Image: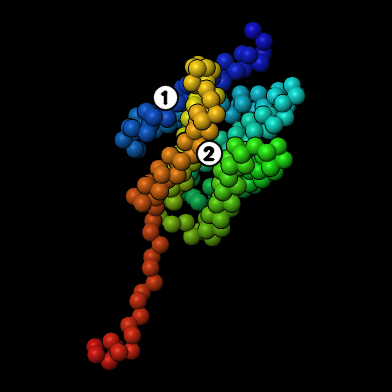
Amino acid sequence: MSAYKLLVVVHVLVGAVALVTFWTAAWLRKGTPAHRTTGRVYLLAMLGIVVTGAPMAIVRVVDGHPVTGAFLGYLVVITATGVWTSWRAVRDKAAPVRFAGPVYVALAVSSLLAGAGVLALGVRVGAPLLMGFSAVGLLTGADMLRRRRRYVRNEAPPRWWMVEHYTAMIGNGIATHIAFLGIGLPRLLPGVDGSVLHYLAWFGPLGAAVVAKVLLDRRWKPKTPSAPSVPSPARARVA
């Protein structure tokens, strides 16, 4: 077995661990020791995906597949961003300024630039998949930089760390399921591969993630206080 094939095998194995532990942590009661332990295993598996995915992207470029290699590198960037953010949000929940430090900025800028690069590449080669999926990096990077302004001013809203954590975990879930549905499943079941399944595998998890984000925000994200209403002069005279 060549070194590259061994790398792929390890990548697939840690991906399987990530898929199982993602759903295990999702169904466990949040904040319990079992949830925290499973979440740590999941993030370690995702770290393994990043560590093995980076050299795989380089090999694809060297082998004469620059588009595939570039896209794999893009996935490594946004996955690394989600892994770090979901971990540090919990560790730094009492220190939002520290959370939004140099590493946070570097990951935000990297996501933004990687998204822009994939968008340009998609336009150049006429690949709708690249153009559509570039939005993940673009929106993630821009939103991180926007939120950072509040954190460094010590204006973080209540439960900010929880919102950061589940938002990043949703992003991690996108990467986990895309890797399984778009890359692993067609290899396991070649008969189900096809253009429709291909795009569904890539954009289906993205759509599900948007729904999950909206539902979780409704439950946990602090509401922006509305401005107090000013009584009209007529009502003031009646009063």
Image mark for residue 102: none
Q: Foreground: 16 or 199?
A: 199
Residue at the far bottom in the pictured view: 237
Could you tell me which quadrant the C terminus lies in?
A: bottom left
- Mark 1–mark 2 Cα distance, whole angstroms, equals 18 Å
The residue under the point 70% across, 24% down is: 60
Residue 5 or 121: which is nearer the viewer? Answer: 121
Q: Secondary structure at mark 1?
A: helix
Amino acid at pointer 1:
Val
Q: Residue at x 63, y 30 (%)?
A: 72
Percent position (x, y) of residue 120? 70, 43
**Total marks placed:** 2
Q: In which image quadrant can residue 19 be found?
A: top left
- Asked whether residue 107 appears in the rendered view, the answer is no
The answer to whether the residues at label 1 and label 2 have Cβ atoms under 8 Å apart is: no
Residue type highlighted by circle 2: Gly
Left or right of 71, for residue 170: left
Indicate the secondary structure of the residue bearing disc 2: helix
User: Where in the figure is residue 172, as x and y percent of width and height?
Assistant: 49, 35
**Residue located 62% across and 17% down the image:** 7
Residue under label 1, please give it: 20
Q: Quadrant of residue 50?
A: top right
Work out whether residue 220 or residue 195 is closer to the camera in this orientation and state it. 195
* Closest to the observer, 37 or 17: 17
Which mark is first along the chain, 2 or 1? 1
Residue reaching furthest top?
Answer: 1
Q: Position of residue 134 (x, y in %)?
A: 61, 42
Q: Taking the image as drawn, is residue 217 in sight?
A: yes
Which residue, given by chain and number where applicable, does mark 2 sit on? 82
Q: Height in image: 98 above or below 42? A: below
Quarter the N terminus occupies: top right
Residue 153 coordinates in the image, percent (x, y): 54, 60
